[in-house]
Image (cartoon, rainbow, N blue to C red):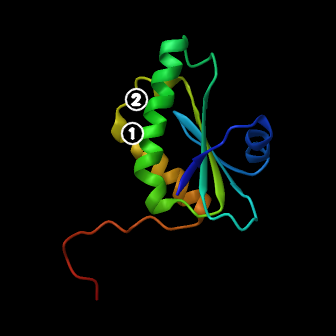
């Protein structure tokens, strides 16, 4: 189950927790340490990203990305804040996906799958 972060207090608490910084986004993760198993998500884009239309587009792209990645990579009982950087508006969605996967792997402590070469390992 996924819920939204609504209050400034929740965003500030996530800002004090773990973070991952990439070229087009920043992802923050916080363990709420409560009994609620819902994953809560928030999105933000500052005026550095662009005008209102560009900020909205960046947040829509991050919403789509989190909807795709959090069911597999997110931890229950955690808050995630996705912050758009200026490149989030024009970056190909594949780059956003790669950065998002790297961010969640780094924050959750999971390893990247090894590249397969086709030859079996001894």
Instruction: Pinpoint residue 91: horizontal percent, then vertical percent.
Output: 40, 29
- The label on residue 48 is none
Q: Residues within 10 Å of mark 1 (few under 14, many from 20)?
A: few
Quickly name the residue at label 2.
Answer: 91
Label 2 sits on a secondary structure element that is loop
Instruction: Pinpoint residue 94: horizontal percent, then vertical percent.
Output: 34, 40
Please state if 104 lies on the left or on the right of 89 as rendered: right
Query: Which image quarter is the C terminus in?
Result: bottom left
Q: Say which of 42 and 120 sits in front.
A: 42
Instruction: Pinpoint residue 103: horizontal percent, then vertical percent.
Output: 54, 51
Considering only vertical position in the picture, is 48 above or below 41?
above
Label 1 sits on a secondary structure element that is helix
Instruction: Pinpoint residue 118: horizontal percent, then vertical percent.
Output: 19, 72
Residue displayed at 61% across by 58% down: 107
Residue sitting at the far top: 51
Circle 1/circle 2 CB separation < 8 Å: yes
Q: Residues within 10 Å of mark 2 (few under 14, many from 20)?
A: few
Quickly name the residue at label 1.
Answer: 95
């Amino acid at each position: 189950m996924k819920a939204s972060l609504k209050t400034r207090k929740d965003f500030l608490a996530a800002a004090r927790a773990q973070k991952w910084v990439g070229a087009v986004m920043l992802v923050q993760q916080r363990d709420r340490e409560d009994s609620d198993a819902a994953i809560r998500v928030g999105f933000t884009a500052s005026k550095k990203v662009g005008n209102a239309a560009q900020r909205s587009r960046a947040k829509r792209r991050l919403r789509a990305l989190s909807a795709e990645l959090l069911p597999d990579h997110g931890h229950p009982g955690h808050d995630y804040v996705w912050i758009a950087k200026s490149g989030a508006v024009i970056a190909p969605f594949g780059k956003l996906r790669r950065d998002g996967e790297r961010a969640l792997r780094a924050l959750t402590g999971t390893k990247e799958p090894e590249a397969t070469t086709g030859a079996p390992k001894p």
